[in-house]
Amino acid sequence: MCKGMEVKICLIGMGNVGTCFLQLLKEKQDNIRVNFNFNCKLVAIFEYDGALIDNDGIDLDNLLDDITNLRKNQYWISNVKAQDLISTLDIDICIETTPTNPNTGEPALTHIKEALNNKIDVISSNKAPFYLHYKKIQDLAEKMNCLVKFEATVASCVPAISIKKSLIGNTISRIRAILNGTNNYILSRMTTEGISFSVALKEAQELGYAETDPTLDISGYDAAGKLVILSNELLGWSKSIEDVKIKGITKITPHALELAKIDDYVIKHLAIAEENNLIVEPRLVKRDSLLNIQGTLNLIELQTKYAGSIILIGKGAGGFEAASAILNDLISIVKKRRGF
Amino acid sequence: MCKGMEVKICLIGMGNVGTCFLQLLKEKQDNIRVNFNFNCKLVAIFEYDGALIDNDGIDLDNLLDDITNLRKNQYWISNVKAQDLISTLDIDICIETTPTNPNTGEPALTHIKEALNNKIDVISSNKAPFYLHYKKIQDLAEKMNCLVKFEATVASCVPAISIKKSLIGNTISRIRAILNGTNNYILSRMTTEGISFSVALKEAQELGYAETDPTLDISGYDAAGKLVILSNELLGWSKSIEDVKIKGITKITPHALELAKIDDYVIKHLAIAEENNLIVEPRLVKRDSLLNIQGTLNLIELQTKYAGSIILIGKGAGGFEAASAILNDLISIVKKRRGF
């Protein structure tokens, strides 16, 4: 596990996040060598229909010159699956970025368990395994003496999870957050333009902020999953998404926003962890509150016992944003394994 | 250096921050024992006119019951100085919170150097030594294989410095910040109430936000010092306060704020580190910008290469706020020394 100058990794899922991660790794590999004294050797890339495996290390320059050539590479093996081959690989860290079913956590969950069972540290950008089976994964990691990191799952690049290390001298008593950029965009537009939910949603879809099927976002399920992870990590809970009281934003009308405005309020879709309860729902927020952020931004407010509120704001989505969170997790794991 | 279950510390300066730190330590000592597996033994407290030294550990409960009894304690020694006695003490970590001259950094600078020369790790809430002699202190610490931490010096409890660990997978390219709560309060009041600088300053003094002699704040010197520390830590620079181009807020008029308002701007006192330059000065900021925070809050915006802006907001001052930053530094040092 990360002994020596070389850290051997595999990537499962080469979609947008996976590809951005490899590009970032390529750009930063000299910097990593100089500042953290290790080389990252990419041993395998798994896709849904096969794998590229090269124990001498896959050449990132060649690969990224034209990623459509992935399946034409001499080391490409068709029709193999990550879960069948992980145990045969000599790797330190497995990076999981596959498209995953939000209700089952698969196939990411299987990949994560298989890696841990083979004593491989894990980094995941998939949140479903963690909002569904947080305790099970953590217990397995502990049993196998492995590290599991997933900073990218909540507000992507914003260090919402790892900030915990910077607040260990304090006590976090409550979390209030805006964890879904799509919903925040829709509500911001409804508020400023007086347009209906359906018009704002269509606009968000045209701009690429909302999916063709936006159900996971607008129902509040996506934000709820992130809230579970955040509260488990920062408040020491062991909840799952079934414990969240969830209300979406579909029933908010221009009229409701207008009424709120009269008393200088806006409506925001908040994710709240407080007194052992998890809630995702539209809430009235004072117009001049720091929670009233615009557009697709994410916000996390940590109420602390000794220092009031500490607020983090940043982009909650994007390929390179998630990739930078993954690289951060990777360097953290290597540092921890080497005790520096 | 932090071997075994016991970590021996001394505190230099028992003013507001020092006292809050001891109270926080008392409150959290069980928590520290359970979660981080060490006991903190307070071996010495130094004040300007003497010291309380007890190698068996000073009883925090007794001490904090009535801190005016400090000098009546059986172990109190009058007319001794920290710099003369540090070398005689068996301690792991020295915590420096004395009132310090902003132009010389003394007496904190001498205390810090003396501790390092005796291979004692240092935590400081005093910024002057670091904005005056950053490189010298870091070089000495490295030579003596010591750790020096000073999270409380910038935006107190807001983890403006330690967030670096959470962004190592990214590249910070620019810092823009509001680092002086007094100035931000004055400008906020001038903007919302249309009052003059002198009236707003008087109000800030009456509320205890501004000192009787507010020069360090309103001249921009205080913010400049914090900016030096932040840029040295986050951008890897080795600057001192002489490198900062500083303009204060004393020349801002209600008329200027009024003119800005017409075009939907406000004037904020920004601290900027960009392209090898350090600047503290009033700047026009769009009214709906995230930089437009109100009151005494501090804000740090980190422009990153791979994830846009990441913003931190929180209280920039206060005894327990600084104390929680110190305790955080303390736990970090112990964790690092023990390799976990």
Image (cartoon, coloured by chain):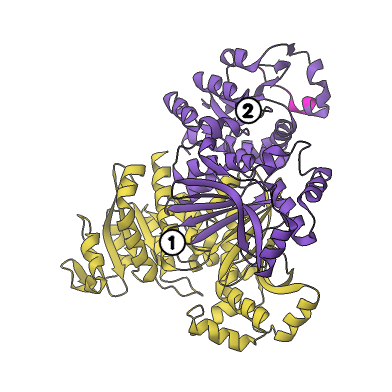
Chain colours: A purple, B yellow
Label placed on residue B279: none
**Label 2 secondary element:** strand
Looking at the rendered structure, whether the residues under marks 1 and 2 are on a common chain is answered as no
Task: Tell me which residue sits at (42%, 38%) in the image.
Answer: B339
Q: Is residue A69 visible?
A: yes
Q: Residues within 10 Å of mark 2 (few under 14, many from 20)?
A: many
Side (left or right) of A238 relative to B282: left
Side (left or right) of B118 relative to A163: left
Q: Looking at the image, which is closer to me, A210 or B255?
A: A210
Task: Tell me which residue sits at (68%, 38%) in the image.
Answer: A216
Q: Chain of mark 1?
A: B
Whether the magenta-drawn stretch holds residue A41 is answered as no
Q: Looking at the image, which is closer to me, B208 or A100?
A: A100
Q: Position of residue A174 (x, y in %)?
A: 48, 53
Side (left or right) of A240 relative to A220: left
**Label 1 secondary element:** strand
Which image quadrant for residue B89? bottom left
Q: Residues within 10 Å of mark 1 (few under 14, many from 20)?
A: many
User: Hey, what amino acid is under mark 1?
Assistant: Ser
Distance CA(mark 1)–CA(mark 2): 41 Å
Q: Position of residue B316 (x, y in %)?
A: 52, 66
Task: Tell me which residue sits at (43%, 61%) in the image.
Answer: B124
Q: Which residues make up the magenta segment? A: A55-63
Q: Chain of mark 2?
A: A
Image quadrant occupied by the C terminus of chain B: top left
Is residue B224 placed above or below A314 in the rendered structure?
below
**Residue bearing the label numbered 2:** A96
**In front: label 1 or label 2:** 2
**Residue bearing the label numbered 1:** B124
